[in-house]
Amino acid sequence: VHSAGTKNITALHLIRCASASSKPTTVKNWINGRAVESKTNNWIELTNPATNEVISLVPKSTQAEMNEAVESCKEAFRTWSRTTILQRQQVMFRYQDLIRKNMRRIAENIALEQGKTVTDAEGSCLRGLQVVESCCSVTFLQTGETMHSVAKDMDIHSYRVPLGVTAGILPFNFPAMIPLWMFPVAAVCGNTMLMKPSEQDPGACMMLVELAKEAGFPDGVVNCIHGQHDAVTFICDHPDIRAISFVGSDTAGKYIYERGSKNGKRVQCNMGAKNHGVIMPDANKEQALNQLVGAAFGAAGQRCMALSTAIFVGKAREWIPDLVEKAKKLRVTAGYEPTSDLGPVISKSAKQRILQLVESGVNQGAKLLLDGRNIKVPGYENGNFVGPTILHDVKPSMNCYKEEIFGPVLVSMSVETLDDAIKIINDNSYGNGTAIFTTNGATARKFTQEIDVGQIGINVPIPVPLPMFSFTGSRGSFRGDTNFYGRNGMNFYTQLKTVTSSWRQEDATPTHVQMSMPT
Ligand code: NAD
């Protein structure tokens, strides 16, 4: 599943192989340009979320292996950081081509390990690919500043230099897109990077690092270790790692931000979310409801930009029965089945947590308009499936509202005015994304002005910025001050160096020692 030689194998074929073989494959460390079997005694079972069959074993890399990976990054940095920007740009041109050619294969692996549909996985690969394409603009994005004659015969110029060894820690929900927010950007700026994929689906990241080698990344520019908390702590503490990029939950993000910062590292953490979709009564009804259903239940709700809360304003509440009808029609089965609209959630424990939050909503007084808790999926009776679920009349004090559910559950509320909706959103602790559906420009403008959320969609349900911009979560959804990808991403992986130079004609040479600062 994880290594070269699987190029023409479909996901369904892989499933059959996985089921037929008595011994699951092992995921390898990637150190110095080679897939290396771990010597660990601690392995994590990676299961197909549609069946819960074990498909491979993920190592908890040993301390020695993790140290070796950092050493490899450190060694590679010595030469990689001295390559020219044009050489690194050429590597990115080759890399984007290889990713495009392998996108289907990577998407099939994601459908198998993570559970989302193949087409959705392919879309997420494309979003990652676009970041790599934007890395090809490094020659524009990395220009510095100069100022001539800041004093007599004196000039200043500043330019950005790479930091050194950096590290990336990944969540399970976008196993290809999110690594591509990280190591290509770090590498094109001249850094090296140690990756730690999610232990729940490392396959896509492994494919991407293999392809990076094929594209011309020298050995050691990107290395990959595996594991859970110990590997994360290792990264936070290692003195040779200068910066950490993290995407995942609040618990892990706060820990990494605090521990990494305390150890003097630059840290950027994209974390949890509760994204609200505001449906105004003047919206294009059909378009708004279709977009809401796609954004709430797509990828089984396991997107950090999923619209997991709907706020119906005024008479728009009359559309709720139509929303329920649309959600009912979604087809739930394994993501690698061509008919699937949404697949399983990642694990048994994730499913359990989702069901508990739905239950708590019902107990706290919400109305269960659509109940996907007891769904049976023919052929996949043992999978982690939750059908589309809608809770209405949800109040901000309820647990199902306060917590990120991260499943195919839409919590819904109705309010009288746009101001009521804005207040609810700004009072929520998260600030990742939000969307308003309206045909009124003034309403959209007021919303944009007053809302305190990083990414705003106007008739766009999932407003993830393209990589010529940056991913701009706010408040509880982000820690750090430099966002992922775009110009900000390049700034995160570089620091400024400033040179002040004085070149004088001989006859202007100073004749005395100057002891005070010039006035
Ligand atoms: P997670 O935090 O459980 O795991 C992410 C990484 O952290 C993994 O590599 C894991 O091994 C490690 N980890 C987990 N718990 C840890 C702990 N206590 N201490 C140290 N390391 C730990 O997240 P996940 O479940 O894989 O991903 C889902 C979460 O990620 C959701 O909250 C989602 O909103 C968030 N997410 C945010 C964005 C964004 O851009 N804001 C994007 C994708 C996902």
Image: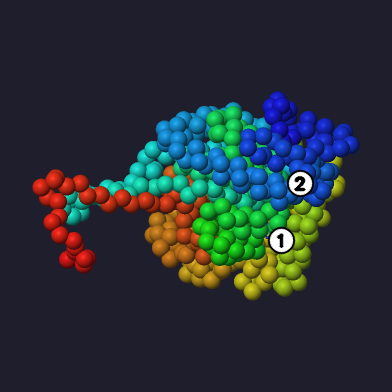
Residue 165, visible in the rendered structure: yes
Circle 2 sits on which residue?
59
Image region (quadrant) for ligand 1: bottom right
Q: Residue at x 42, y 35 (%)?
A: 84
Mark 2 is surrounded, within 10 Å at the Cα level, by few (under 14), some (14 to 19) or many (20 or more) other residues, namely many
Quadrant (top left/top right/bottom left/bottom right) for the C terminus = bottom left
Amino acid at pointer 1: Leu
Q: How is the image coloured?
A: rainbow
Q: How many angstroms separate mark 1 from mark 2 (CA)? A: 43 Å
Mark 1 is surrounded, within 10 Å at the Cα level, by few (under 14), some (14 to 19) or many (20 or more) other residues, namely some
Mark on residue 185?
Answer: none
Judge from the rendering whether residue 362 lies leftward or rightward of residue 147; answer left or right.
right
Circle 1 sits on which residue?
369
Amino acid at pointer 2: Pro
Percent across and percent down for residue 114 are 71, 45
Judge from the rendering whether residue 373 lies leftward or rightward of residue 159; answer left or right.
right
Q: Residue at x 72, y 73 (%)?
A: 364
Q: Residue at x 72, y 68 (%)?
A: 361
Which quadrant would residue 405 be assigned to in this image?
bottom right
